[in-house]
Amino acid sequence: MTRYTDPNYLLGQQYRDSSNLDARVALHERFSTNPQEWHPWVFDQFDLPATARVLELGSGPGWLWRNNADRIPAGWEVTLSDFSPGMVETAQAALAGCNANLRFERIDAQSIPFEDGRFDAVIANHMLYHVPDRPKALAEIRRVLKPGGRLFAATNGKEHMRELDTLIRAFNPAIIYEFASDANPFRLENGGELLGQFFAPVELRLYENDLHVTEVEPLVAYAFSMGSLSQGDLAGREDEFRTFVTAEMAKRGGAIDIDKHTGLFIAHKPA
Ligand SMILES: C[S@@+](CC[C@H](N)C(=O)[O-])C[C@H]1O[C@@H](n2cnc3c(N)ncnc32)[C@H](O)[C@@H]1O
């Protein structure tokens, strides 16, 4: 089992709290080339009725709702969930002042504790690649959706942030980069086929965006958010890595450009 789907690593270290994810999101928020941010774009794809029940799986610290707090219709009942208690706690605290009808639960996507046909929509953004028994999770999602309900599932492509992988491997070719995009088990290139075993039709909407990174520190923090690097090949070498990234940025005229490949699958449960 790779670290992508190792629950001991994911729950015990990587996602015990939101600090690793925070470092990665900070890079995207500060250096994205698309002026429309990711979470508002995702929210724009939810053409749901004014009254709807929505379940988010693997919601992390709840950014989707934090970044769209003033747009959540009063008639929506939204359950934010994650298998990491630390993530659920952070999401709940961050959204304490939000007037929308929000609930918070600890849920593993492979076993969803709700009755059949409860939800109009299930959201699983950048999380299905972490689920070891993905067919089980997809069967569970289909079960809890109403007939005609939809799964919204975001993920990345195999070329996503390739320049970052290349940069890290230029520092040390032996490095094992735990979330390397070409090892992503649920990606833009195969997600349609995997979802198609449970849903029809399945559509994919791409989000156009890249990174133009002009500061060293957020890139170093991003690399160090990966346990395989911070506790492995980069352990004790933070200054050396920082110096390396600084030199690479200077070589490229003061900015490192990183291409992103990200999109959202919309998978329908037949009516
Ligand atoms: C990359 S983060 C994405 C967080 C959030 N969806 C977002 O897009 O900002 C992946 C999240 O999925 C959660 N997760 C991983 N495996 C899970 C599982 N089997 N069931 C539920 N949540 C899981 C992690 O704890 C983490 O919060």
Image: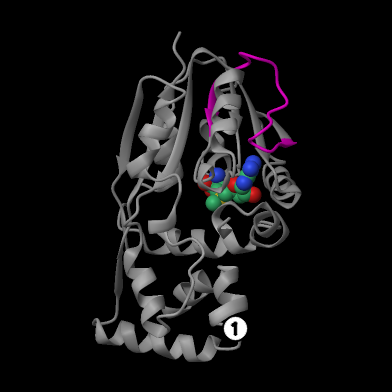
Where does the C terminus fall, quadrant-wise? top left
* Residue drawn at point x = 33 percent, y = 28 percent: 203
In this view of the protein, can residue 98 be seen by the observer?
A: no
Secondary structure that dominates the magenta span: loop
Q: Residue 2 in the image: x percent, y percent? A: 55, 58
Where does the N terminus fall, quadrant-wise? bottom right
- State the residue in front, 252 or 127: 127
Q: Residue 58 in the image: x percent, y percent? A: 61, 42
Q: Is residue 34 above or below residue 194?
A: below
Q: Residues within 10 Å of mark 1 (few under 14, many from 20)?
A: few
Q: Dot 1 lies on which element? A: loop
Given the image, on which type of amino acid does mark 1 rest? Answer: Ala
Dividing the picture into quadrants, the one containing residue 227 is: bottom right
In reply to whether residue 213 is colored magenta, the answer given is no
Circle 1 residue: 235
In reply to whether residue 116 is colored magenta, the answer given is yes
Q: Residue 84 in the image: x percent, y percent? A: 71, 48
- State the residue in front, 32 or 237: 237
Q: Is residue 55 above or below residue 211?
A: above
* Residue drawn at point x = 70 percent, y = 40 percent: 97
